[in-house]
Image: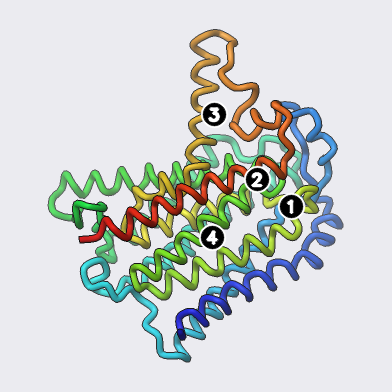
Amino acid sequence: MSTTIALVISAVAAFGITGGLGFVIIPWLRKLKFGQTILDIGPSWHKSKQGTPNMGGIMFIIGITAAFIIGCIVLAITGVEFHGTDAELYPTGDKVLVFATLGLAIGCGVVGFADDFIKIKLKRNEGLSAKQKTLGQLAVTLGYTATLWLSNNTVWYLPFIGPVNFAKNLFTSIVFWLLTVFIVYGCVNSVNLTDGIDGLCSSVTATVAVTFMIASGILRFAGLGVLSAALLGGMFGFLCWNWNPAKTFMGDTGSLFLGGMVAGLGYAIKCPLLLLPIGIIYVCETMSDIIQIGYFKITHGKRVFKMAPIHHHFEMCGWKEKKICLVFSSVNALFCIISLLILFFGRK
């Protein structure tokens, strides 16, 4: 019961802080002329969104971080163990997993902030160069991977198989580093691609947050639950301002923060491979972009989709932004349920 109270307080606090900050931060962004520049590569009707305040992700970054701290205080007051109590998965408690997740998210958010700031304030539409953004994300990812390594969080639990320790020898250690960098970097950028229409990334990520909240109960990991609850509250608080027609966009500041958060939560449950079904929409967004670009180059100008990522394809087919958000979130929620069943029944 005490854990449930902490989760509820964390979610409500994140919702209230994030939503409330909209009354302060959105006017401030307007005053600073931090408006979104709509590029010609998107649907033509997106031009009407020109000037909408960007970098609104600052709202939920503050809201989630503050709510997480509040939730941790509640856990401490009520005497609930913060760390995972499943001895097989979390032999040393592994508190570091949750704090490293928040650190990864904030680090990615800083890279996104730099990108947004250059785009908006310095009037460079492309923001950071591809190389600069990649180097920034890789630096944060390598720092996160090193944290996992130094804290002995090198065990993955494979459903229906059991735990696999990557620290056994030099070869498996190298595999761990390569896989973690690939998974985290890929996840961060997949979430970033999903932020293309009003409310889409926020609503899809809300289903992901619920999934990790339930997973925290299965794994008896209260700290994970508090952070997931804060993420859920932050997403709903932001949707108050980001639902179509959006009053603000999260920008790369917000989407890269969310990408880091989702990736870290996948590692916190010791089963990052479940990020594939848990974030199936993120995966589809990325694959649609890869397929479109690859097919375009191979065929010298032909396309598989009317526009990529895939949410733009459905826009070009006549779907309204609200419909895309609801359908995509529902599909993601379905795969999240499947993921939870795998997590629950796949434990030996």
Query: Disc 4 marks which amino acid?
Result: Ile
Query: In the depicted view, which residue is nearer to us: 177 or 13?
Result: 13
Which badge, 2 or 3, comes first in the chain's sequence?
3
Can I make out residue 346 in this image? Answer: yes
**Pointer 2: what residue?**
325
Secondary structure found at label 2: helix
Rounded to the nearest angstrom, the CA distance separating label 3 from label 4 is 26 Å
From the image, tell me which residue sits under label 3. Answer: 289
Task: Return the disc, 3 or 4, that comes first in the chain's sequence.
Answer: 4
**Residues under labels 3 and 1: Cα distance?**
24 Å
Vertical comparison of 331 with 260: above or below: above
**Mark 1 / mark 4, whichever is N-terminal:** 4
What residue is shown with label 1? Answer: 243
Placement of the C terminus among the 4 image quadrants: bottom left
Report whether residue 257 is seen: no
* Residue 30 figure quarter: bottom right
Image vertical order of residue 346 relative to residue 1, above or below: above
Q: Are marks 3 and 1 in contact (CB under 8 Å)?
A: no
Tell me which numbered mark, 3 or 1, is placed earlier along the sequence: 1
Q: Amino acid at mark 2?
A: Cys
Contact between labelled residues 1 and 2, with CB atoms less than 8 Å apart:
yes
Q: Nearer the viewer, mark 3 or mark 4?
A: 3
Q: Is label 1 in a helix, a strand or a loop?
A: loop
Mark 4 nearby-residue class (10 Å; few <14, some 14–19, many ≥20):
many
Name the image quarter holding residue 321.
top right
Q: Position of residue 246 (x, y in %)?
A: 78, 50
Residue 112's x, y, as percent? 60, 49
Q: For numbered disc 4, what is the local secondary structure?
A: helix
